[in-house]
Amino acid sequence: MTKLSMLLTMQLALVAFAATSDTCATGGVCPGTADVEVNGNLQLLQVGVSVRSADTAGGTAQAPAGADAALALAAAPAVVDQALYLDTVRDTLTGAILRTPGVKPGSGDASSLVHIPYDEQTRWQGASWCDYCYTMAGGARVQNVRDLVQKTISEGIPGDFLEAGTWRGGCSIMARVVQRAMGEGENRNTYLCDSFSGLPLSSQKKDGNAWSRMHFLEVSQKEVEDNVKHFNALDSNVHFRKGYFSQSLPKVRRS
Ligand SMILES: C[S@@+](CC[C@H](N)C(=O)[O-])C[C@H]1O[C@@H](n2cnc3c(N)ncnc32)[C@H](O)[C@@H]1O
């Protein structure tokens, strides 16, 4: 890779951490999110559905009044509101839509950790771990990934996206979905770098090994690949780099 923009998630996290909202996940306007006008699009979809059902009625159905106008609308390219789509992806990734439980950080796997009820503000801030979600980064940081990838593309800045420490892959999924939604899927790559087996043992006497016992942080590459696939975002421009960063990242830099 010649022009790799290393948008490390941890750095993004610091930038976005201050952005919070009480209302965004339940329909309010989130920081950095444009207001969305959807009525026109919904009307268009409804018209399209009624025309299709007339078409498939075996040719005997009488065309309804106004069918010419409806057919003209149905023939128009499908309109998908990009901001609304990306909001929905973001809130699905963080578990905000399903209001999935939080998890108290600690050693062990999901079954041995304490689950706590969903809290909108905590989830937006990414202030605790979450279960049944694709990223623990929280809404503000995932929004920041989205904003930065959008800005990079809209300003014509060349480069790829790399996440060092993917866990279940949610931030990379957000980045890849933005790349594709903006028509840049073929031109840009997304790199997911992780041990896919949790944190390493400490390498120095002064560090403890507590992190390496946090099995909740261990997610296999196969599981992450499946997660990317669920968002229809897995393709040949998505690359997995398995291994501890000390080994994997220098190779990415050189490639
Ligand atoms: C806190 S989670 C990352 C959360 C993730 N960015 C998200 O959006 O949910 C830390 C991840 O980094 C990985 N990791 C931590 N230290 C690592 C290292 N030295 N080498 C490779 N992977 C590492 C872990 O396996 C884990 O998946």
Image (tube, grey):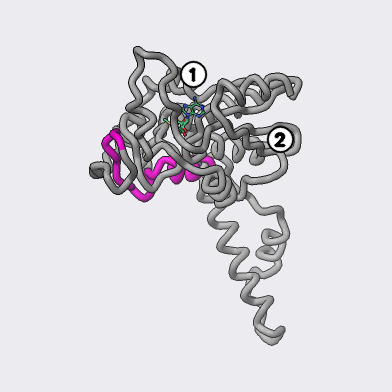
In the foreground, 114 or 188 = 114
**For this rendering, which residue is in front, 139 or 162?**
162
Name of the residue lying farthest toward the bottom: 60
The crowd level at tag 1 (other Cα within 10 Å; few <14, some 14-19, many 20+) is: few
At label 2, the amino acid type is Glu
Residue 129 coordinates in the image, percent (x, y): 34, 36
Span colored in magenta: 86-107
Which residue is found at the position 65% from the left and 35% from the top? 179
Q: Which residue is more in the foreground, 57 or 134? A: 134
Which quadrant of the structure image shows residue 8? top right
149 falls in the magenta region = no
Above or below, 253 relative to 43: above
User: Badge 1 is on which residue?
Assistant: 11
Callout in the foreground (2, 1): 1
Q: Which residue is mark 2?
A: 184
Lower position in the chain sequence, tag 2 or tag 1: 1
Image quarter for residue 3?
A: top right
Real-space CA distance between mark 2 and mark 1, rounded to the nearest whole angstrom: 23 Å
- Secondary-structure class at tag 1: helix
| 48 shown above or below 169 | below
Label 2 residue SS: loop
Q: Residue at x 33, y 21 (%)?
A: 208
Whole-percent x and y of residue 197?
48, 37
Quarter of the image with the N terminus is top right
In the image, residue 94 lies in the stretch drawn in magenta = yes
- Write the residue at 64% across / 33% down: 190
Quarter of the image holding residue 137?
A: top left
